[in-house]
């Protein structure tokens, strides 16, 4: 059974309904009925909530991976510094100027290499993973 409902809509909205009705070759009533049904459907809200929940779950997993990777990076750096400080012998005062010059040269080379790799999007950690996978 169908009842009649008279309503007033803005002229612009009626124009859009008319355009869609002409393009899809359906009645204006059918378009309005589908639109109202979609608006009133609890499924629509449930679908949005489910999509939002899935997205939040995915973001939570990504954040957990980032936290794990950050811990690994921090631990790696700390172990490297400890190891380097443990095995590096002290430098005699007469050799310090030469050692500092060599250190600056090596650091400049490091920064240049880092800049090139970042610009190209190449990551050393990815290369390590590729090497480990190929073994």
Image (spheres, rainbow, N blue to C red):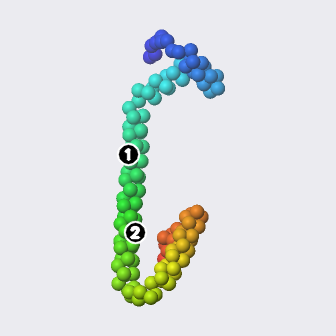
| SS at badge 2 | helix
**Nearest to the observer: residue 133 or residue 97:** 97
Sequence-wise, the earlier of marks 2 and 1 is 1
**Nearest to the observer: residue 15 or residue 67:** 67
Apparent side of residue 15 relative to residue 33 in the rendered image (left or right): right
| SS at badge 1 | helix
Residue beneath label 2, please?
73
Residue at the location (51% across, 76% down)? 104
How busy is the neighbourhood of tag 2: few (under 14 within 10 Å), some, or many (20 plus)?
A: few
Image mark for residue 38? none
Residue at the location (62% across, 27% down)? 24
Check the image and name the residue furthest to the front.
94
Quarter of image, res 74? bottom left
Residue 55 appears in the figure? yes
Q: Position of residue 93 (x, y in %)?
A: 41, 87
Q: Is residue 24 above or below residue 1?
A: below
How busy is the neighbourhood of tag 1: few (under 14 within 10 Å), some, or many (20 plus)?
A: few
Q: Position of residue 109 (x, y in %)?
A: 55, 74
Q: Quadrant of the N terminus?
A: top left
Q: Position of residue 85 (x, y in %)?
A: 36, 81
Residue at the location (38% across, 37% down)? 46
Q: Position of residue 132 (x, y in %)?
A: 48, 77
Image mark for residue 53? 1
Mark 2 or 1: in front is 2
**Nearest to the observer: residue 2 or residue 37:** 37
**Nearest to the observer: residue 110 or residue 46:** 110
Residue 127 appears in the figure? no
Q: Is residue 8 above or below residue 68?
A: above
């Amino acid at each position: 059974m169908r009842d009649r409902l008279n309503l007033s809509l803005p002229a612009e909205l009626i124009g859009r309904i008319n355009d869609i009705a002409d393009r899809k070759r359906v009645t204006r009533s059918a378009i309005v009925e589908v639109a109202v049904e979609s608006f009133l459907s609890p499924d629509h809200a449930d679908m949005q909530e489910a999509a939002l929940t899935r997205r939040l779950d995915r973001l939570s997993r990504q954040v957990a991976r980032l936290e794990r990777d950050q811990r690994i990076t921090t631990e790696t750096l700390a172990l490297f510094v400890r190891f380097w400080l443990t095995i590096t012998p002290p430098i005699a005062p007469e050799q310090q100027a030469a050692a500092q010059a060599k250190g600056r040269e090596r650091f400049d080379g490091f920064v240049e290499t880092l800049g090139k790799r970042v610009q190209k999007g190449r990551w050393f950690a990815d290369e390590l993973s590729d090497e480990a996978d190929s073994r």
